[in-house]
Image (cartoon, helix red, strand yellow):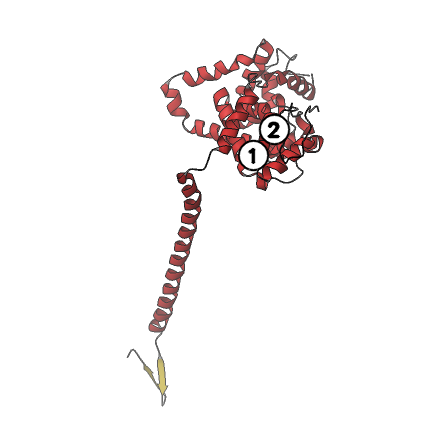
């Protein structure tokens, strides 16, 4: 974890710094303790220094957008959701438990917002689909980041899963969160997450059999 | 390949699917969030912030008052009907007289 700036005497963070992007998965529990700037930024925001919030947004923005994108599959929507999540977290910063890492909290907020969008979309899916193909085309256009064939095949296979399995599989496989973390983010039990993943694994193994050496041991 | 091993390999390969965004993503998002949280609260937002909880509290109050009033009235009506529906018999010198008679 490298942070180049030093914290001045003021309540807020220094004006120039390089933030360390959050580590993946199981390390999130340690994030708050590993990064002294994070705790101090939260404390400063609580005391009314809104400028200190920039540090938290910079640090978590990429992952938050990535999580949102994985669920809604649209870059613009993902950024809007990330913005909403950060604003919501800022407005509720008083409820944030002291000493805990900011990551799980913001990941949970953005996951819930993204799931709401997906639910809303599926409610109006009928009208969208009868309208024509633009929704599907737009989703495919967002796949620009997926460059190689293997990644494209994996992406297509994950996208073909039912909604809950798809979201859980994406958070586990792509975003690299573990079962407990996904359970917290989706407000589901760890058992339910394991069950969704188990079903997803069987379907993915069938679909990707040619890439991973067959469906049987 | 065992299922666990397959999933492990898949997880390793799927990491490439993380959405990276462009180089300016963090800066752009930081600016957008800063603009939102520094934006002064409008009168409409202020009213909405107060009006909604106030309206909800009033609604709950009115509902509970209506329920209590209805319940009290029904209780009173029930006790009157109970007295009226029970015949009162008076026995005098071995003969039984009913109030209804």
How far across and how far down the image is residue A170, in percent?
58, 23
- Under circle 1, the secondary element is helix
Q: Upstream in the sequence, badge 1 or badge 2?
A: 1
Residue that mark 2 sits on = A55
Q: What residue is shown at x 50% (from left), y 33% (from top)?
A: B38
Q: Residues within 10 Å of mark 1 (few under 14, many from 20)?
A: some
Determine if residue A74 is in view: no
On whether disc 1 and disc 2 are found on a single subunit, the reply is yes
From the viewer's side, name the closer residue of B61 and B94. Answer: B61
Q: What residue is shown at x 41% (from left), y 43% (from top)?
A: B47
Image label count: 2
Horizontal side of residue A149 vs B94, given as left or right: right
Q: What residue is shown at x 35% (from left), y 80% (from top)?
A: B89
Quadrant housing the N terminus of chain A? top right
Task: Determine which of the numbered discs, if any, sits on residue B52 in the image.
Answer: none
In three-dimensional space, the C-alpha distance between marks 1 and 2, rounded to whole angstroms, equals: 10 Å
- Under circle 2, the secondary element is helix
């Amino acid at each position: 974890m490298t942070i180049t700036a030093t914290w001045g005497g003021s309540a807020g963070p220094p004006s120039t710094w390089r933030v360390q992007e959050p580590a993946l998965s199981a390390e999130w529990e340690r994030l708050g303790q590993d990064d002294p700037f994070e705790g101090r930024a939260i404390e400063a925001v609580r005391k009314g220094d809104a400028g200190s919030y920039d540090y938290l947004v910079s640090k978590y923005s990429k992952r938050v957008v990535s999580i949102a994108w994985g669920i809604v599959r649209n870059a613009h929507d993902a950024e809007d959701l990330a913005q909403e999540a950060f604003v919501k977290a800022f407005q509720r910063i008083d409820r944030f438990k002291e000493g805990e890492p900011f990551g799980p909290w913001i990941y949970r907020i953005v996951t819930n917002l993204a799931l709401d969008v997906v639910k809303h979309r599926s409610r109006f899916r009928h009208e969208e689909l009868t309208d024509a193909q633009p929704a599907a085309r737009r989703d495919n256009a967002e796949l620009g980041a997926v460059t190689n064939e293997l990644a494209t095949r994996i992406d297509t296979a994950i996208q073909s899963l039912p909604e809950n399995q798809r979201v859980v599989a994406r958070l586990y496989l792509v975003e690299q969160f573990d079962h407990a973390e996904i359970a917290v983010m989706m407000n589901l039990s760890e058992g339910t997450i394991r069950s969704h993943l188990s079903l997803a694994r069987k379907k993915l193994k069938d679909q990707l059999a040619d890439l991973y050496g067959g469906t049987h041991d | 390949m065992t299922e666990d091993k397959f999933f492990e390999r898949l997880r390793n390969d799927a990491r490439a699917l993380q959405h990276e965004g462009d180089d300016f993503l963090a800066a752009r998002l930081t600016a957008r969030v800063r603009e939102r949280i520094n934006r002064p609260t409008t009168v409409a937002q202020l009213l909405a912030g107060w009006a909604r909880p106030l309206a909800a509290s009033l609604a709950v109050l009115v509902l509970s008052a209506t329920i209590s009033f209805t319940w009290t009235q029904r209780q009173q009506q029930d006790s009157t009907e109970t007295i009226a529906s029970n015949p009162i018999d008076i026995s005098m010198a071995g003969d039984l007289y009913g109030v209804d008679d």
